[in-house]
Image: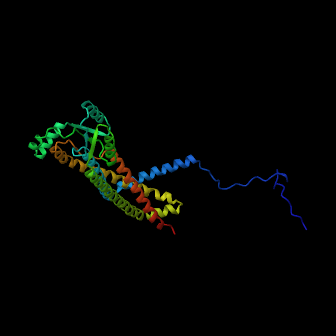
Amino acid sequence: MKQPTRNPAKGAGRTATEPRPPRPAGAVTARTRLSDRWHSWLGHHREMAAEALRRFFATPLASLMTAVMIAIALALPATLQLGMGNFQRAVAGWDGQPQLSVFLHRDARATAVERFTEALRDDAAVADVTYISPEQALAEFQQASGLGEALAGLGANPLPAVLLVRPAAVAEPQLQALAARLRDSALTDSVVLDMAWVQRLARLTELAQRISLGLGLLLALGVILVVVNTIRLHIENRRDEILVVKLVGGTDAFVRRPFLYSGLWYGLCGGLLAWLLVAVGVALLSGPVAGLAASYGSGYALQGPGLTYLLGLGGGAALLGLCGAWVAVARHLRAVEPR
């Protein structure tokens, strides 16, 4: 049998012990640095925020209506809270605020009483001190009671000197602490503090604060529901786009991001409009309130929403919009899956 011939050119230049050349490896796996991932993540956030803002202004009428609904819902508790602050300022500056009547000993020396009065005026817990001498107290009592002739027959003045102390704070704990310190003085015979109306005022203030808190929570829930419904419509309008993104490997976070920024922009614009509504309302009421205060001889003026209110309403509304968008995306985005 004839042996097969061997081609001498085949394998020429390579000995039996020489290793074969390595085969091509095919696809190569590339590693991305952490800094590149971070910059890519930030860049996508900036791009989605700008895109959401462009979509917001692409439909100005619908976006404005949603923002106005959010603004009205936020303006109501904000107005109530601002009104409570102005009411507390008005009560703090009212001449009828609580006073402590400090009755001094009849045998107290005038110099000691004068030093005691000056010390009270320098006290940070005291707003004002008025000294009423026994003669002034008797004259006021005669005029108020109508017993001038009967009191004129008394041999001596039975009324002591009185210090009318107006405290700097109207809260009940501070008033009780100040009254206790005045009773401990050697010159003091007794201290009278009428706490009835102070307690009523504290209870009314507490009631108004709780009503404001409850109303604020209910309307905050309303804001979230408005944003949820709006973002749901956005998801339905972009269903085909979401399907394509998921088909090419887009993650849920990638798909979710533009809708979260849409909710944030809706909330932020609604918060700014709410601040504007409150500011306009205060401007309209400032004139009548100032005229009413002037008729009572007071220089009281309404305090409008400042920069703190602007930041609070804007930031709080943006957070509510973000929460509403998150709820809408978590609920409705699961239904949009490629098959």
Taking the image as shown, residue 158 lies to the left or right of residue 322, namely: left
Quadrant assignment, res 186: top left
Q: Position of residue 17 (x, y in %)?
A: 85, 52
Residue most toward the front? 155
Total numbered badges shown on the rendered structure: 0
Q: Nearer the viewer, residue 103 or 65?
A: 103
Q: Position of residue 35 (x, y in %)?
A: 56, 46
Q: Position of residue 212 (x, y in %)?
A: 31, 56
Q: Nearer the viewer, residue 213 or 2?
A: 213
Taking the image as shown, residue 64 lies to the left or right of residue 141, namely: right
Quarter occupied by the N terminus: bottom right
Residue most toward the left? 149
Q: Nearer the viewer, residue 257 or 59?
A: 257
Residue most toward the right? 1
Q: Nearer the viewer, residue 269 or 163?
A: 163
What residue lies at 12% left-to-right and 46% top-to-bottom? 145
Taking the image as shown, residue 295 lies to the left or right of residue 87, namely: left
Residue most toward the bottom? 339
Q: How is colour applied across the structure in the image?
A: rainbow
Q: Position of residue 325 (x, y in %)?
A: 42, 59
Answer whether residue 71 is visible to the viewer in this image: no
What residue lies at 15% left-to-right and 45% top-to-bottom? 295
Taking the image as shown, residue 153 lies to the left or right of residue 91, namely: left
Answer whether residue 126 is visible to the viewer in this image: yes
Tell me: residue 137, above or below residue 246.
above
